[in-house]
Image (cartoon, rainbow, N blue to C red):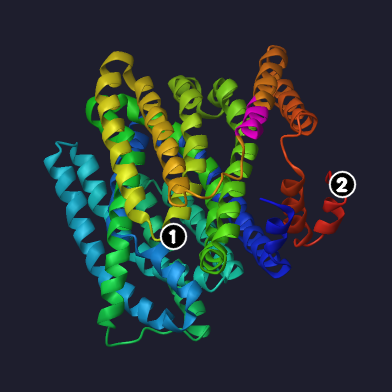
Amino acid sequence: MSESSASSISTDAARRAARNVGAIALAQIVSKGALFAWQLVLIPLLGKSAYGIYTTVTAFFLVGVAVASFGMGNIVIREVARRTALAGKYLSATLFYQTILALVAYLGINAVAALGDYTPEVRGFVAVAGLSMFVDQLGTMVYEQLLAREQMVTTSLVEIGTVIVRIVLTALALVAGLGLVGVYAATILSGLARALVLWRALLADGVRPEFPLDRALVRNLFADATPLALAAFVNQAYTQLDRLVTGRFIPEGVAYLGAAFIIIVGMVELLSTTVLIAVFPIMSRTYSENPVVFRALVSRLAFFTLLIVLPITLALSIFSHTFTLVFGADFLPTADILRVLVWYGLLAMVSNVFAQALLVQNQQRITLGVRAAGLTLNLGLLLFLLPRFGVRGAPLATASAEALVLLALVWLFWRLDRGAAPVIRTGQIARLLIAGGLAAAAMLLLGSLHFILGIVGGLLVYAVAVLLLRVLHADDWALLRRLIEAMPGGGLVARWLPG
């Protein structure tokens, strides 16, 4: 992307993006950080057996959510961001149809749990946890409307409050000796509070469901959402497949795998989901107005994701054994799983950028095909590796499948416009990988003395290598400067940037 392309992203758009990212980042750091810490505390509080049940039930729940939402959320955000006058019509459509879909999903996950020969405890808690799908969907459909209207401050405050209420209620339930029943009751109650607050905020903003339903709009919504719904289902199945298959064949291993997934999911939500949610409305409008700037934005977003996440991935992989300090010696296998699974996290974050770009271009059918192929490959690798390597084969299967998914998405994204040259050159990526290699060497060398010294020293080596190897070009710094300057107090930081 040239300097002119970078400057094509207006100051107003940069300011909105910075505000949105800042609001969502704060919510992610506070709410997801608190929830992440609480999940780590929950592991020893519940014990390995109960936590294994919790992990398996969560996998069922998340697959059910993918069915209940039917991929409508991203379509609603995309369309309402472009045409706000249709907000009420989209709200009525999602309110009616997603409630029906939640019922279908609830019956479906309970049927699978019963037919899959899972334990009575798992089947019972799937029935209880599934009730929260109705409550969560009622709040999420409004959450997406507010995102489309770029009300990120409101949604962020609600998310923070919801997590705080959930943690407090869960803690009280555990103190009262209610166990997993209390955990799921707290989830349902906090979700209900979230839905009520979000609905009040949207109604105050002047948006109300408009009946009767607009049949043409509903047809278009389902036409666009169907491949996305299938892709979302495949994505959740892809993510949860490890735990479901492991829970079926190696029940004692699912707790270790679940603990590792908590770390990876937390990393993805904090470092990737935060940014992608914030820039989605802007990406949708940019593609309509200037596809050239859109392609440049996608390329930079993917490259910056790799730039930021690579050193974190190296640190988590090399020093994964330190997590036994949190989980305890009984969860030593978690460290071995995390060592490989963290690379899946990196690959997934970069893949998500291109998947969202294809969605903006209304090419979600392409994403569906790629994800379905990845799911099939992941399942095949799981069935091959689990008997040979035990639970450690699960992360290897997932990471291998995600690597091929990423390659396919990148190739297909650029194939849509054959006349466009990739903004990120192979030499730039090569220099970034060299910087990562130097950082890994420093982590291993200094980590032999102490893991904290290895982490800090490795990150410093990485930062210096990025500067000396000129991993970032002048236009990269120009774009970063515009975004940082748009943030409160960003002018002071921007003065120290190169270029």
Q: Amino acid at mark 2?
A: Trp
Check if residue 284 falls in the magenta segment: no
Give residue 44's mark. none
Q: Position of residue 139 (x, y in %)?
A: 41, 68
Judge by depth and name the residue closer to the eye, 228 or 209.
228
Give above or below for 495 relative to 404: below
Residue at x 51% of width, y 50% of height: 419
Q: Residue at x 29, y 31 (%)?
A: 377
Image point 84% across, 43% down: which residue?
498
Residue 387 percent coordinates (x, y):
26, 17
Rendered location of residue 162, percent (x, y): 50, 61
Residue 361 numbered mark, or none? 1
Q: Which residues are magenta?
A: 426-433
**Tag 1 and tag 2, C-beta contact below 8 Å:** no
**Is 322 left or right of 254, judged from the image as shown?**
right
Q: Which residue is mark 2?
A: 496
Name the residue furthest left. 115
Q: Quadrant of residue 141?
A: bottom left
Depth check: give the residue in front, 283 or 277. Answer: 283
* Helix, strand or loop for disc 1: loop
Look at label 1 and name its amino acid: Gln
Which comes before the other along the chain, label 1 or label 2? 1
Residue 322, placed above or below residue 247? above
